[in-house]
Image: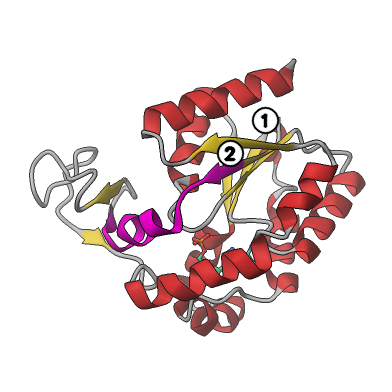
């Protein structure tokens, strides 16, 4: 099954994608993670994306479309994928349709995670991850059991995303409302759009997403 998790930054798309990786063996395709890896590696593509990402603006469509087109050709995607952070514009949604048609792949469901803007800033500015294993934490909502030590791997090194600050969050939310939200009607018309309550607990959101997927599987 191939799905899109759609929602503003901080809605919990990454967290839910990781849960689906373990529950269903699907693979998470996060354009944000892929772009951060490009920036870190110092590639030409990363250099094009870096300043836009730091400003909380979207990177050009052709750049992310190219990344996704290459990635979904990899064999692990045949078990089903979860698009997280892509598409983010109508042009990207159209390009995705075209590439799936060419590859004879289907899109089964588009799940919108609905969250109030007010909750997002607190969610985003408090988050940090283990630098060794990538486990996600939050200053308020999910602290490690022992301060400064990762629950999962025991590492004491943590990192924060450069764009997870109050100023950049404003631009990221504006980009979501102006450029990404217009793709909701695009999928609504196709009958693929479903909604879950992104304000609920992580477990409850996960239950709602699993129910949508069970329904889509028939
Ligand atoms: P994310 O990790 O999804 O919050 O993405 C972090 C940043 O990467 C965004 O603020 C954009 O600058 C860039 N980015 C990620 N995915 C896309 C996309 N599909 N289209 C354009 N820019 C993107």
Image quadrant in which you'd find residue 25: top right
Q: Is residue 203 above or below residue 57?
A: above
In x, y percent, where is residue 20?
52, 31
Q: Is residue 57 visible?
A: yes
Q: Is mark 2 within 8 Å of ligand 1?
A: no
**In the drawing, does residue 214 fall left or right of residue 161?**
right
Residue that lies at the very extreme toward the left in this rendered image: 146
Q: Give the secondary structure at mark 1.
A: helix
Do tag 1 and tag 2 residues touch (Cβ < 8 Å)? yes
The residue shown at (60%, 65%) is 177
* Residue on which the image places disc 1: 79
The residue shown at (70%, 29%) is 1
**In the drawing, does residue 175 fall left or right of residue 77?**
left
Badge 1 or badge 2: first in the primary sequence: 2
Label 1: how many Cα within 10 Å (few below 14, some 14–19, many 20+): few
Viewer-proximal residue among 122 and 82: 122
Q: Is residue 120 magenta?
A: yes
How many numbered markers are drawn? 2
In x, y percent, where is residue 194?
67, 35
Q: Which residues are magenta?
A: 112-131
* Residue on which the image places disc 2: 27
Viewer-proximal residue among 167 and 32: 167
Marks 1 and 2, Cα distance to the nearest angstrom?
8 Å
Q: Is residue 41 above or below residue 6?
A: below
């Amino acid at each position: 099954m191939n799905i899109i998790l759609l929602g503003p930054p901080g809605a919990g798309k990454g967290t839910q994608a990781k849960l689906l990786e373990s529950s269903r063996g699907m693979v998470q395709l996060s354009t944000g993670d892929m772009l951060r890896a490009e920036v870190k590696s110092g590639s030409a593509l990363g250099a094009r994306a870096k300043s836009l990402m730091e400003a909380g603006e979207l990177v050009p469509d052709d750049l992310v479309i190219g990344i996704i087109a290459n990635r979904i050709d990899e064999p692990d995607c045949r078990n089903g994928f979860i698009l997280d952070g892509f598409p983010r514009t109508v042009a990207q949604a159209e390009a995705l349709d075209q590439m799936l048609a060419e590859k004879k792949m289907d899109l089964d469901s588009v799940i919108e995670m609905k969250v109030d803007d007010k909750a997002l800033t607190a969610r985003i500015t408090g988050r940090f991850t283990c630098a060794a294993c990538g486990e996600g934490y939050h200053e308020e909502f999910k602290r490690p059991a022992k301060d400064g030590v990762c629950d999962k791997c025991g590492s004491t090194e943590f990192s924060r995303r450069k764009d997870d600050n109050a100023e950049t969050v404003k631009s990221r939310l504006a980009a979501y409302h102006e450029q990404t939200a217009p793709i909701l009607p695009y999928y609504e018309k196709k009958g693929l759009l479903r909604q879950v309550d992104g304000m609920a607990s992580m477990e409850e959101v996960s239950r709602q997403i699993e129910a949508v997927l069970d329904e889509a599987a028939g």
